[in-house]
Image (cartoon, rainbow, N blue to C red):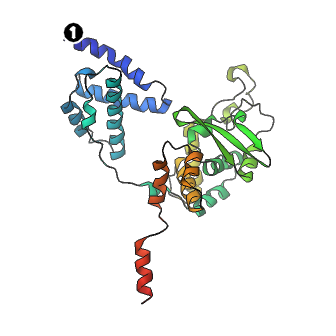
C-alpha cells in the first residue's frame, strides 16, 4: 500500500513530464483527459490494468466519437511514454484499439466559389487579409496569431513567411503577390516584433513597455469568431466553419490545380505524406461510376 501511495504522489510529476513541450491547448486537453482517467480508476498509474483501461473506455458514453477517440488516445500515449521512461511496468494501452471514426473531411471542404464569396464579402481590411492568409498560406489558426512582422521577408514582387508551427518546426511559405500585398499593407510603421494581427485592444499602446513592441496577441477564439461571421455572411455552413476549413480547402484546391502532394505537404507542414494524400481520396477526380455512365450513354 505504501508503494501505491508513493506512485499516486508521483503521477502528477509523471504527467507533467509527458506533457512537456506540447502546445498549450494540447496540454490543457490532455491534462483534463488524464484527470478523468485518474478519477475513474482511483489508483496510481503503475497499478493500471488492461481491465481498467477497457472499463474506462466503455464508460465514455457521454462523449462524441471524436472526443472519446482523443481521450483514449491521450491515455494510450501517456502509458506508452510511462513504459519508455520505466515509470510503468507494462504498456496495457497496446492492447486497446481506437475505434474507427466516420471520415467527415469531405463535409469540411469548401468550394472555390465559397472561398471567393467569403473573401469578397469581408469588408474589414485586417480580417480580409487574415482570411486570405488562412486560405492561400494554408496556416493553422495558432500560426496566424503568432506571426510577427519579423517573420515576413520580401521576395521581388512578392514575399514569404517563416511559420513556426506544429511540432516546433519552422517552414517557409512563399505567398502569391496579391496575398503578400494585402498583408503587407497592414504594417504601416509597426516594429518588426509586433504581431501582424494584434488584438485591437492593444492598438495604440504597442510602444508601452508592459506589452513590449508586440502588442497583445490576438486570441485564436477571436479568429474563430471572425471566420464564422464571414462564412455566415456568405451563407456557407452557417455556424460551423472554422479556420481549419481554409487549410482543407487549400490542400484540395491546390491538388486539383496540379500541385504535387509533396509540395502541398511542405506548404502545410504536414507530418507525413499520408496526411496530405487523404485529400485525394475524399475529393476524387475520377470514379468507375463515371466510366459506367459514359459507356451506357455510348450504346
Whether residue 13 is visible: yes
Residue 228 position in % (x across, y down): 55, 50
Corner quadrant of residue 296: bottom left
Q: Residue at x 52, y 44 (%)?
A: 270
Q: Secondary structure at mark 1?
A: helix
Split into 4 quadrants, where in the image is the N terminus? top left
Residue 56 position in % (x across, y down): 24, 34
Residue 176 position in % (x across, y down): 71, 52
Q: Residue at x 49, y 67 (%)?
A: 285
Task: Return the residue nearer the eye: 202 or 94.
Answer: 94
Whether residue 228 is visible: no
Split into 4 quadrants, where in the image is the C terminus? bottom left
Badge 1 crowding class, 10 Å Cα cut-off, few under 14, some 14 to 19, many 20 or more, is: few
The single residue placed furthest to the bottom in the displayed view is 299
Corner quadrant of residue 213: top right
Task: Return the residue nearer the eye: 27 or 265.
Answer: 265
The single residue placed furthest to the top in the displayed view is 2
Task: Return the residue nearer the eye: 71 or 119.
Answer: 71
Instruction: Classify 121 as above or below 83.
Output: below
Q: Residue at x 59, y 50 (%)?
A: 263
Residue tagged by mark 1?
Answer: 2
Instruction: Classify 244 as above or below 168.
Output: below
Residue 194 position in % (x across, y down): 71, 31
Q: How many marks?
A: 1
Left or right, 208 with respect to 72, comes to right
Amino acid at each position: 500500500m505504501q508503494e501505491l501511495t508513493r506512485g499516486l504522489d508521483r503521477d502528477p510529476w509523471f504527467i507533467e513530464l509527458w506533457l512537456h513541450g506540447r502546445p498549450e491547448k494540447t496540454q490543457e486537453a490532455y491534462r483534463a483527459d488524464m484527470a478523468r482517467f485518474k478519477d475513474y480508476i482511483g489508483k496510481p498509474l503503475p497499478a493500471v490494468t488492461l481491465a481498467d483501461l477497457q472499463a474506462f473506455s466503455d464508460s465514455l458514453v457521454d462523449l462524441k466519437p471524436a472526443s472519446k477517440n482523443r481521450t483514449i488516445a491521450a491515455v494510450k500515449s501517456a502509458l506508452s511514454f510511462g513504459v519508455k521512461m520505466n515509470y510503468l511496468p507494462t504498456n496495457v494501452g497496446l492492447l486497446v484499439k481506437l475505434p474507427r471514426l466516420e471520415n467527415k473531411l469531405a463535409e469540411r471542404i469548401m468550394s472555390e466559389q465559397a472561398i471567393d464569396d467569403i473573401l469578397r464579402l469581408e469588408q474589414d481590411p485586417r480580417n480580409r487579409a487574415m482570411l486570405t492568409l488562412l486560405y492561400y498560406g494554408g496556416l493553422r489558426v495558432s500560426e496566424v496569431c503568432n506571426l510577427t512582422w519579423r517573420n515576413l521577408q520580401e521576395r521581388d514582387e512578392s514575399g514569404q513567411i517563416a511559420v513556426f508551427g506544429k511540432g516546433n518546426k519552422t517552414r517557409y511559405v512563399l505567398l502569391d503577390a496579391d496575398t503578400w500585398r494585402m498583408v503587407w499593407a497592414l504594417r504601416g510603421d509597426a516594429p518588426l516584433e509586433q504581431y501582424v494581427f494584434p488584438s485591437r485592444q492593444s492598438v495604440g499602446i504597442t510602444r508601452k513597455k508592459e506589452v513590449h513592441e508586440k502588442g497583445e496577441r490576438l486570441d485564436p477564439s477571436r479568429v474563430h469568431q471572425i471566420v464564422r461571421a464571414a462564412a455566415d455572411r456568405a451563407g456557407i455552413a452557417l455556424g460551423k466553419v472554422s479556420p481549419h476549413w481554409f487549410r482543407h480547402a487549400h490542400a484540395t484546391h491546390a491538388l486539383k490545380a496540379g500541385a504535387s502532394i509533396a509540395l502541398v505537404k511542405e506548404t502545410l507542414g504536414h507530418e507525413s505524406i499520408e496526411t496530405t494524400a487523404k485529400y485525394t481520396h475524399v475529393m476524387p477526380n475520377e470514379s468507375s461510376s463515371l466510366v459506367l455512365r459514359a459507356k451506357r450513354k455510348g450504346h
